Amino acid sequence: MAPPAPTDRKFLGRLSLPERRYLTDALRTETVGGVLLLAAAVAALIWANTPISDSYESVSDFHIGPAALGLDLSIQHWAADGLLAVFFFVAGIELKRELVAGELRDPKAAALPVIAAICGMAVPALVYTLVNVLGDGSTDGWAVPTATDIAFALAVLAVIGTSLPSALRAFLLTLAVVDDLFAILIIAIFFTSDLNFAALGGAVAGLVLFWLLLRKGVRGWYVYVPLALVIWALMYNSGVHATIAGVAMGLMLRCTTREGERHSPGEHIEHLVRPLSAGLAVPLFALFSAGVSVSGGALRDVFTQPVTLGVVLGLVVGKALGIFGGTWLAARFTKAELNPDLAWPDVFAVASLAGIGFTVSLLIGELAFAGDEALTDEVKASVLMGSLIAAVLASVLLKLRVRKYQALVSDEERDDDQDGIPDIYEEDNPAYHLRMAEIYERKAAEHRERAQLAGAPRDGGDRPA
């Protein structure tokens, strides 16, 4: 009779090799996109705070598009509703893949990161609400500090030169994916204006057609791209936020492989679209959303007004405490053991890094305070300040453990037999050990030959003095 399976599970344990490869590929693109995002945000701030700031407002407010179709939008509006639909399309594919083939496919394994993500959204919302109830501010922005920007977080890691072990990177990515899911629900439920049922019905019909074409195996970008544009336009005119169209289409893609397939259709399309999302769509959104006037008085107001203070504290304090507290409690009650190579301060550092809520926080801020331009700009400034403080705090905490991370990453990437598979994944493979034995035997023979050339006796004894 087989022994009973252990009840304890490792938290932040080693990823499977396919999952690690997917993670490495996805985060490589997100890191490059994050650096571009950071550059775009800095450019926007410089542009909006120099003598040519009038041109920033002129470009952002410039309208373009067919008015007859209800799409005569400003450049800033196109960036928020149009380009971010591409971002949410990729988010939809990520979520689908995580649910069917990734970290979220096993309910037991998914419990910890999902609980951590939920707490990491609930606590910032509670912090914001408490600050504004006590300070007699507006509670409309409760959702602003709930998001995590994975690209910006990875850009911070790239700037400070810290490479996280794959388990911590996977934990951060899973948090961001679950965050995106709840952000989508928040946008769909709380920021839907008066519905145009005809347009909404057309959008739903378009989505059904999109799904049927996928199931029939129809291929060709020239079929799906025009259909996606029509669905997006109908969704925009329906009163539901247009980014929901991107999410819905992403969720429809198949993210499991069939016989003879190396990659699923969803992974293939994600690989093609992610660079467009990370390298163009999100940076352009940042360029036309992050340009707020920054002055001594504006920065002071961030820490004195309840709305802006609530956003900053929600991102910096609420995110860190929510994610860390949720993770610790979940691990304690599920008896999941922490990976012995890591420690709880590592979880807190990643939780602090998740306080960078740039892209989706800016979007929700625009939606929450639409019509109040002055307050919208103040909320944007508080998002920037909160994300900056969270980035600095996380950088300090991560730097304290950088040597440990470097050692773990080195172990994960070592491939002494040069077969393309990290050695750590071949410890139970006899063929690997035989290859390593041959390698060491060749090295031993080479060193014996060098020793003889250097004058060592052929019998291996010591040379006479």
Image (cartoon, grey):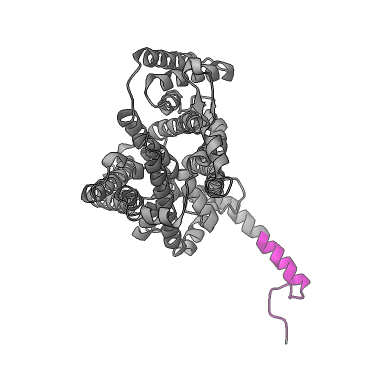
Q: Can residue 51 be seen in this view?
A: yes
Image coordinates for residue 360, horizontal then vertical, percent: 41, 39
Provide residue 122's location: percent of width, then percent of height: 27, 44
Quarter of the view holding residue 447: bottom right
Residue at point 44% right, 45% down?
Answer: 358
**Relative to the observer, which residue lies in front, 267 or 450?**
267
Is the N terminus in the top left, top right, bottom left or bottom right quadrant? top left
**In this rendering, is residue 73 above or below 1?**
above
Is the C terminus in the top left, top right, bottom left or bottom right quadrant?
bottom right
Q: Which residue lies furthest to the bottom in this view?
A: 465
Residue 163, placed above or below residue 292: below
Q: Residue 458 lies in magenta, yes or no?
A: yes
**Image coordinates for residue 228, horizontal then vertical, percent:** 49, 20
Of the pair 24 and 234, the residue shown nearer to us: 234
Q: Across the whole image, how many numbered discs are drawn on residues?
A: 0
Residue 178, picture quadrant: top left
Q: Camera-side residue: 172 or 159?
A: 159
Residue 379 pos. (x, y %):
38, 45
Q: Give the range drawn in magenta.
A: 443-464
Q: Which residue is drawn at 57% across and 31% down?
A: 272
* Camera sees residue 1: no
- Whether 405 is among the magenta residues is no
Question: Seen in the image, is 106 located left or right of residue 70?
Answer: left
